[in-house]
Image (spheres, coloured by chain):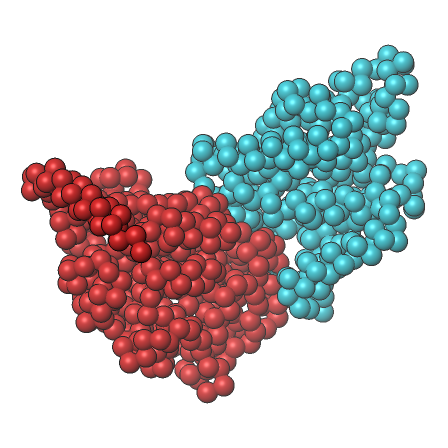
């Protein structure tokens, strides 16, 4: 019974981690059709922001949850203005450009801070599930993921900005005819996606080794989840994360993390084979 | 056939050589260092996933070569360092190894960090007959006449960690290790030492180097309820295991021993609550209180800045690799591979920062002091010293003096 509790908890954490690392990519890819290969590096920037801010004496919660999205969101805006906006609609070119950005960011951070592993300590302790110990910090991850999903849903559904955003993504020319500037909306969307990636990096910083090349460890899972989720960002990310998170965690526990990753990939391949447009490409198509 | 032309050419060559020699003589006489330099090749990862460890090893290589050159070089010739940054990339290892052996034609190679990289380049130097020094603590057992290993091995280190754990912590262990040859062989050694000491192993998990989430592993360990956790995890991503272990509150419950923890900058960058108490055993610790050890640290800091506070056994082993080679060259009076190997097989010793180190002729590994220590508030707390530990990893089966043609890596026999 205790074990079941612990496993449930781990599965929840796994799902939440996937949601966090995927949502930023989902916003940029799902809404703008830009394959952002620098997504992992945006996370890395977020993690570095958290580590550096914490080292400079900023309160750990602010350093983890507030500063990374702001900083990385700003970086995203700058990159959108200087590079990405010239490449809209040219998928291969954006892939190359963002790959270049990713290499550039790794190089920049390595030059600035050195190729060393850094970290911040987890701000909260642990708790007991029966005779098992578990990290209280995992609850923070779950809570953040839930908050981000809810926030995104509310933003897209309840606000005027969300409405304009969806309209622009659906038909930019029509939106422009209605007096919206698609250029600005694209900019804001890219910034939002970058900010979400930054948040993921900040939240995951305390439990991972923060190094310039850390992004690589996350990016493939993020892409798989985005593709599995399909066009609806919030619902798709949530559903795909749940499917993959459950499979990955349970198989990892029964066997090894390697087999867990294999199971995740097999599940993803099967899913894409059956639902080429992702889960929300067929079901819940009208969701967000 | 065309004897006449041959003779004329010959005469011309002789004349030229003579003239060249006559011009060159004053230079030789004035300064021995103007002689053609001896080439020392270095292959280390200055950047990438292993850059953290590699950077200091590169600095140590530069420092040691400079020491030798300041002392007048070897055989009256200066030493020229030819170094390539392998960027934590296996492909670059084989590529640069070929370059060093075939194009640069270096006289000795020092380098390689992971065991995977060593196994990638070892055959290349075997074929090109270029002497190779591998200077990293590793899983032990390499038995190859062309290769000298100066790092400590499980029989000298892991053995002591397991001993201490069996005496002080309990009998049941759980092993977590990196998923490549180092992790697998080290895990086998851990299993063997546990069983030899009357303990048992509840489970062994291997993790590829890009795994970042260890929650399922930590649950499995908790379910198995071991009294000891033994870790052979490697690299930046795996450092997350120690953090997540601490975050899950396991730190105070199950004690841990680790085979490569603290060789990088773990002590300075991780929280003390995470690092304190993790048992390690190495051939050297940077706060070892001996004059030679302090001189090494001071020398490195003088050359590379006061922030060189994370030196480890990887660096002293690099120092020893170069110094052993220099000692061999001096004794042989030559840089020819066979002469140097024969000299190194005569049982020579050097004084290094780690104490007196002797090259074991049979195994081409070092007989050295090893030390047991655990982190305490960012410092190493020394627990024990094991003088003159013997590299017994090959179980007496490797004797390169008797069987110079032997070329294999011995791994522990778990059936016995």
At a point 73% along the width and 57% down the height, the residue shown is A264
Q: Is residue A276 depicted above or below A164 in this figure?
A: below
What is the quadrant of residue B113 in the picture? bottom left
Across and down, in percent, residue A14 comes to 69, 53
Across and down, in percent, residue B365 comes to 30, 69
Does residue A249 appear in the picture of this structure?
Answer: no
Q: Nearer the viewer, residue A282 or B168?
A: A282
At a point 13% along the width and 40% down the height, the residue shown is B19
Q: Nearer the viewer, residue B235 or A233?
A: B235
Q: Is residue A77 left or right of residue A59?
A: right
At a point 82% along the width and 56% down the height, the residue shown is A270
- The chain coloured red is B
Across and down, in percent, residue B180 comes to 52, 63
At a point 47% along the width and 65% down the height, the residue shown is B182
Across and down, in percent, residue A211 comes to 51, 43
Q: Is residue A1 depicted above or below A100 in this figure?
A: below
Does residue B191 appear in the picture of this structure?
Answer: yes
Q: Is residue A195 depicted above or below B204 in this figure?
A: above
Q: How many marks?
A: 0
- Image quarter hosting the N terminus of chain B: bottom left
Q: Is residue A198 depicted above or below B54 in this figure?
A: above
What is the quadrant of residue B305 in the picture? top left
Q: Is residue A244 left or right of residue B147?
A: right
User: Chain A is which colour?
Assistant: cyan
What is the quadrant of residue A186 in the picture? top right
Q: Is residue A150 left or right of residue B38?
A: right
């Amino acid at each position: 019974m205790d074990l079941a509790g612990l496993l449930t908890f781990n599965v929840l954490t796994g799902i939440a981690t996937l949601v966090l690392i995927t949502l930023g990519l989902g916003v940029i890819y799902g809404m703008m059709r830009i394959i952002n290969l620098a997504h992992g590096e945006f996370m890395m920037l977020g993690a570095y922001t958290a580590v550096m801010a914490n080292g400079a004496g900023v309160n750990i919660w602010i350093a983890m949850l507030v500063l990374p999205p702001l900083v990385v969101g700003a970086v995203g805006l700058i990159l959108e203005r200087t590079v990405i906006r010239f490449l809209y609609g040219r998928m291969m070119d954006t892939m190359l450009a963002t790959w270049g950005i990713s290499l550039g960011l790794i190089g920049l951070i390595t030059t600035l801070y050195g190729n060393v592993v850094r970290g911040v300590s987890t701000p909260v302790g642990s708790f007991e599930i029966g005779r098992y110990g578990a990290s209280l910090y995992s609850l923070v991850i779950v809570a953040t993921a839930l908050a981000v999903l809810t926030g995104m849903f509310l933003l897209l559904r309840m606000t005027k900005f969300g409405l304009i955003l969806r309209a622009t993504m659906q038909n930019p020319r029509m939106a422009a005819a209605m007096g919206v500037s698609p250029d600005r909306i694209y900019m804001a969307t890219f910034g939002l996606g970058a900010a979400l990636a930054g948040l993921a990096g900040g939240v995951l910083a305390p439990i991972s080794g923060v190094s310039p090349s850390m992004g690589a460890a996350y990016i493939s899972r993020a892409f798989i989840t985005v593709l599995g989720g399909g066009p609806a960002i919030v619902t798709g990310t949530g559903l795909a994360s749940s499917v993959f998170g459950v499979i990955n965690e349970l198989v990892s526990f029964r066997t090894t993390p390697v087999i867990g990753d294999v199971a995740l990939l097999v599940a993803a391949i099967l899913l894409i084979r059956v639902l080429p447009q992702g889960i929300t490409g067929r079901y819940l198509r009208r969701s967000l | 056939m065309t004897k006449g032309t041959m003779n004329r050419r010959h005469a011309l060559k002789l004349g030229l050589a003579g003239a060249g020699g006559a011009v060159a003589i004053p230079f030789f006489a004035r300064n021995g260092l103007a002689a053609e330099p001896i080439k020392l090749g270095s292959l280390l990862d200055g950047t990438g996933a292993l850059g953290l460890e590699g950077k200091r090893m590169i600095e140590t290589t530069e420092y040691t070569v400079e020491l030798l050159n300041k002392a007048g070089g070897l055989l009256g010739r200066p030493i020229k360092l030819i170094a390539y940054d392998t960027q934590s990339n296996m492909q670059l290892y084989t590529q640069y190894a070929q370059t060093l052996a075939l194009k640069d034609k270096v006289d000795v190679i020092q380098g390689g960090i992971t065991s995977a990289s060593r196994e990638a380049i070892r055959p290349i130097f075997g074929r090109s007959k270029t002497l190779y020094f591998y200077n990293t603590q590793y899983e032990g057992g390499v038995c190859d006449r062309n290769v000298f290993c100066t790092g400590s091995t499980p029989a000298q280190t892991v053995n002591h960690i397991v001993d201490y754990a069996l005496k002080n912590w309990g009998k049941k262990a759980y092993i977590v290790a990196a998923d490549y040859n180092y992790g697998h062989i080290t895990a086998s050694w851990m299993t063997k030492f546990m069983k030899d000491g009357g303990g048992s192993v509840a489970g062994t998990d291997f993790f590829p180097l890009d795994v970042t989430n260890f929650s399922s592993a930590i649950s499995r360990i908790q379910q198995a309820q071991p009294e000891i956790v033994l870790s052979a995890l490697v690299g930046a991503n795996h450092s997350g295991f120690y953090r997540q272990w601490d975050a899950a509150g396991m730190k105070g419950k199950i004690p841990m021993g680790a085979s490569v923890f603290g060789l990088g900058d773990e002590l300075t960058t991780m929280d003390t609550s995470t690092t304190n108490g993790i048992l390690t055993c190495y051939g050297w610790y940077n706060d070892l209180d001996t004059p030679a050890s302090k001189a090494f640290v001071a020398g490195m800091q003088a050359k590379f800045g006061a922030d060189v506070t994370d030196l480890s056994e990887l660096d002293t082993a690099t120092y020893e690799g170069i110094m052993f080679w220099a000692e061999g060259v001096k004794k042989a009076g030559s840089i020819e591979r066979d002469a140097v190997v024969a000299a190194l097989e005569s049982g020579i010793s050097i004084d290094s920062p780690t104490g007196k180190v002797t090259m074991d002729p049979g195994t081409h590994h070092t007989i050295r002091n090893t030390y047991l220590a655990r982190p305490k508030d960012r410092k190493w707390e020394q627990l024990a010293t094991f003088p003159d530990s013997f590299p017994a990893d090959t179980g007496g089966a490797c004797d390169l003096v008797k069987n110079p043609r032997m070329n294999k890596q011995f791994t522990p026999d778990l059936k016995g």
